[in-house]
Amino acid sequence: MRITGKSVWVGSGFLISGICLWLFVRDIEWGRVGMALREAKYFYVLPCLLGLALVYVLRVLRWQSLVSEVKRVSFVNIFSATAIGFMANNLLPARAGEIVRTVILGKKEGLGMATVFATIVMERLLDSMSLIILAIVVFALIPSVHTGAGTNPTPQEVQDAHFLLQIKSGIGIMGAMCVVSLLLFIILDLYSKQAMDIIGRFLFFLPHNLKGKIISLLESFVLGLKVLKGVKQVVWLSVLSFGVWFLSIAGTYILGYSFGIEIPFTGMCLVVVCTGLAVAIPQAPGYIGVFHLAVLKSLEIFHVETSVAQSFAIVLWTVNLFVTLTMGSFFLWREGMGLGQMAREPTSPPAEL
């Protein structure tokens, strides 16, 4: 069997998820976790569900604002592509949902696939940059007693300090990638013609028709990057991006009341920052294992009982999955598509992608 880059990515994702899931359950006390689940006050799930649903609305408004700089698009079509794409991210490997929503919106609105995909890249860049700013604020506000910097730190404080250092390193890496990506996009925006000429020279060995298709594809991608038009739009997109994270944090914080988790709001911000970083690495579909471990380790910093933190992680993951699958299934039905057709989209995108 031929080993490809995609198979390595998928395989590493399953391996990472498997390791994280093992770390999450290796010392689990099922009796205590079951008791925590039975005693939870599930009334608080309802406002959490509402908050997560509103997150989708903000994401749709933001993507619509980006795409509309290329072409005015329907809110419903954007919502449909978003919901189905996020469901695909939870069911298919290798983040195939990004290709799924690219293809769906491109077909429905008659847009070039490369152009649509470029707007998704910009969307992810906005997500990352707002998460970095949120993380900087959180690390400035969390209590210093959790850093393990005392003269005689306990083993737990040392472990907490190591975990926080890993998170800071992850934020630093993400920040560096954002800066490089932003600089690259600016260069492509300002000097797109020169860039296409240089790329064309590097592709001199290709047949003329193939080289022309590649250049056309890159030009469509660059068109999708030319979506930030003025300070007003940047402010609007920033508000939507921070709104996405705020609603995610608010929903998570409210759900904490189900399990009697009483930590500062900044503590729940740290939980969301950790899960935001965790879902960015290769993993199995549904973020299984990685998501759970990130929630557990971040709650341990605030001395939340392990069985309670594990129960909370399981319910939070289930609630997120429920919202994603429910919305995705509805729009999949509305579009007259089946799961099999959705799964085929990433492997058979139109030629213009």
Image: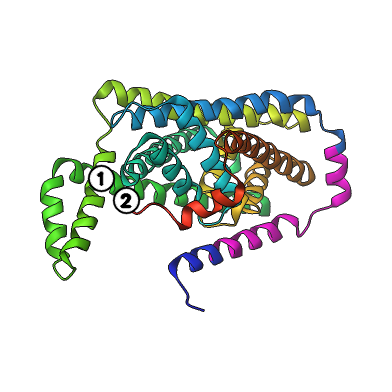
Tell me the distance, in whole angstroms, between the alpha carbons under discs 1 and 2: 10 Å
Residue 218: x %, y % from top left: 24, 51
- For disc 2, the marked residue is 352
- For disc 1, the marked residue is 220
**In the picture shown, does residue 280 fall above or below 258?**
below
Quadrant of the image occupied by residue 5: bottom left
Q: Residue at x 77, y 33 (%)?
A: 259
In the visual, does 39 lie left or right of 191? right
Q: Are marks 1 and 2 in contact (CB under 8 Å)?
A: yes
Give SS at disc 1: helix
Amino acid type at circle 1 is Ser
Say which of 332 and 280 sits in front. 332
Asked whether residue 182 is in view, the answer is: yes
**In the picture shown, does residue 318 fall above or below 351?**
above
Q: Residue at x 55, y 53 (%)?
A: 343
Quadrant of the image occupied by residue 313: top right
Start and end of the magenta stretch?
Answer: 12-37
User: Predominant secondary structure in magenta?
Assistant: helix
Find the residue positioned furthest to the top: 232
Residue 29: x %, y % from top left: 84, 52
Mark 2 packing: few (<14 Cα in 10 Å), some, or many (20+)?
A: some
Find the residue positioned furthest to the front: 336
**In the picture shown, does residue 9 fall above or below 113?**
below
